[in-house]
Structures are given as C-alpha cells and as structure tokens.
Amino acid sequence: MAIRSKSTKLVQTTVLKQILKRCSSLGKKNGYEDEEEDDGTLPHDVPKGHFAVYVGENRSRYIVPISFLTHPHFQTLLRQAEEEFGFDHDMGLTIPCQEVVFRSLTSMIR
C-alpha cells in the first residue's frame, strides 16, 4: 500500500512541476519578462506565489495561489484540463469548468 501511495505522490509531483514550468514558459513567450528583474517570467499583475488560469466559456482570467496545486479538488480540475486541452499550447492554463463552479471551489479552498 505504501508503494502505491509513493507512486501516486511522484506522479502528482511530476504533473505539478510540468504545470509550473508551463506557466513560467508562457510568461516568457508572451513578452512578460520584467526589465528590472532577470527572473520576471509572469505578467506584472500576477503576484509572487500565484499563477493565472483561464476558466469557462469566455476564458475569464483568474489569479490563484500556487498552494491550490496541492488541493485534491484543484488537482481534479488540472487532470481534466490535461485530458481536454493538454499542457502544451499557447492559450495558458485553461480549466474546463463553468466559472460559477470554479469560483465556488476556490472560495471553499481558501
């Protein structure tokens, strides 16, 4: 049983690293590099420790804390995003759910 748990944690860690790497590379691709800091790879309106996601039919943008990545319900959304969109595209991290569901989930996590 412990082996299965370790295996699951390794897979989750790998997926989370891919997501963070993808978020970082999107900032560079879209010209969001900070001129004053060499490591500024996110848009200026994304605070440190957060990332942007796009949700719903209209692809509304939300800024969420990185800590959400470890929450089981948010991980379910990430798996759905991977299945539907994959992580290798220029659209940013897109979450395939209705905005009202996403807002409800994120308010519950906070």
Image (cartoon, grey):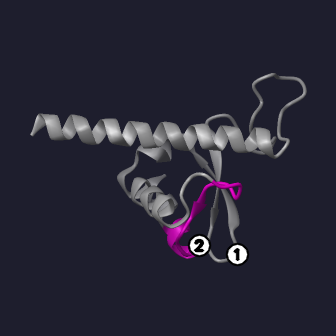
Q: Quadrant of the N terminus?
A: top left
Q: In the image, residue 88 lies at what x, y percent?
A: 60, 52
* Residue 9 falls in image quadrant: top left
* Viewer-closest of 97 and 7: 7
Left or right: 95 with respect to 11? Answer: right
Most extreme residue toward the front is 88
Identify the secondary structure beneath mark 2.
helix
Instruction: Tell me which residue sits at (44%, 60%) in the image.
Output: 108
Q: Position of residue 63 (x, y in %)?
A: 66, 52
Between label 2 and label 1, give the one nearer the viewer: 1
Q: Given the current orientation, which residue lies at the most extreme left position?
A: 1
The mark nearer the N terminus, 2 or 1, is 1
Considering the numbered disc 1 on the image, is that residue within a helix, a strand or a loop? Answer: loop
Residue 15 placement (x, y as % from top left)? 44, 43
- The residue sitting at 48% across, 47% down in the picture is 68
Q: Is residue 74 above or below residue 16?
A: below
Q: Amino acid at mark 2?
A: Glu
Query: So how many labels did they put on this image?
Result: 2
> Which residue is painted at 42% across and 58% down in the image?
79
State the extent of the magenta-drawn residues as a range. 89-104
Tell me: 98 left or right of 46. Answer: left
Rendered location of residue 22, percent (x, y): 61, 43
Q: Label 1 belongs to which residue?
A: 58
Asked if residue 90 lies in the magenta stretch, the reply is yes
Q: Alpha-carbon distance for marks 2 and 1?
A: 9 Å
Q: Is residue 92 magenta?
A: yes
- Tag 2–tag 1 contact (CB < 8 Å): yes
Q: Which residue is mark 2?
A: 99
With respect to residue 61, does 51 lie above or below?
above
Quarter of image, res 49: top right
* Amino acid marked by disc 1: Asn
